[in-house]
Image (cartoon, helix red, strand yellow):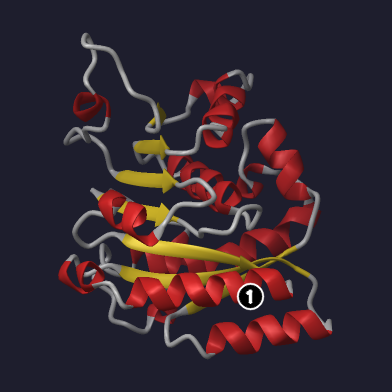
Amino acid sequence: MHRIVVANAKGGCGKTTITTNLSSFYSSKGLKVRLFDYDEQESSIDWLNSRNAHPILSQKTTIEGVAAHKNYDHQCTRSWMLRVTHDIDRVVVDTPAGTSVSELCSILNQDDKLIIPVMASPIDIKAATRFIHTLKQQKLIKEKNIQIAVVANRVRQNTLIYYSLEQFLLSLNVPFLTSLRDTQLYSKAYETGCGVGDLKINRAVKDKYQWAPIIRWCESKIQKYNQDTKQMTNAQVHNIKR
């Protein structure tokens, strides 16, 4: 079992997009996924409900959703709801906007992978700078062996602000995995409970390709590849197994 946490104190940076598309990818490979949604808006849970109502995906989905922000009654304790059984292959965690570093550290477990999505705007870049700087100073991050990576989200390449974002991400001394383009396909996928990998249209091919570095990094330790995650080929990315 492996956990991937998606977090950024800044809202609107695409945490749910990363969370739902990761969950969808793993489910498409037959892996059993536990999706924890710590956000009171429950955007990831809403996506999963749409997926469960999908005429095709509902028949083969392997995702279990948990509204992790809730306080449950005496008949169902919080610790019981947050448990991870041995049959779970991957855990994906969606966190809310405004999550402090101390709150995030309480969510993180030993050897978790932490993905931080960042958008191309001066406000987002400054917010990410503070968040990542504070995060890297936490002793708990080293003690729990948390691996951190960043993803540029909703980008329009060949623009000045994207160049600034790219230079910023490269300066962080953490892996800069990929850039996900600004496209309505993510909204289309979300509304129907899909990931972009589920869309059987030519326009989604580029987006599927952009996800390969994220999957490589998430799977690098499990599949026992070395630190150069690019050693994992596209064919291996699309043949993830338990």
> Would residue 234 be seen by someone viewing this image from the given angle?
no
- Residue 195 figure quarter: top right
Residue plotted at (61% across, 76% down): 126
| 55 lies above or below 201 | above
Residue 176 drawn above or below residue 155? below
Secondary structure type for disc 1 = helix
Give the amino acid at mark 1: Ile
> How many numbered markers are drawn?
1
- Left or right of 199? Residue 114 is left
Instruction: Judge from the rendering whether residue 88 lies leftward or rightward of residue 93; answer left or right.
Output: left
Place of residue 210 in the rendered image (x, y in percent of width and height, measured from the top left): 62, 67
Residue 187 vertical position relative to residue 174 in the rendered view, above or below = above
User: Going 51% across and 48% down the picture, which residue do you hit?
Assistant: 19
> In this orientation, which residue lies closer to the viewer: 78 or 234?
78
Determine whether 89 is above or below 74 in the image: below
Residue 85, image x and y in percent?
19, 33
Q: Give the labeled residue for mark 1.
A: 125
Q: Residues within 10 Å of mark 1 (few under 14, many from 20)?
A: some
Which percent across, then down, holds residue 33? 37, 38
Residue at (37%, 84%) from the top-left corner?
Answer: 228
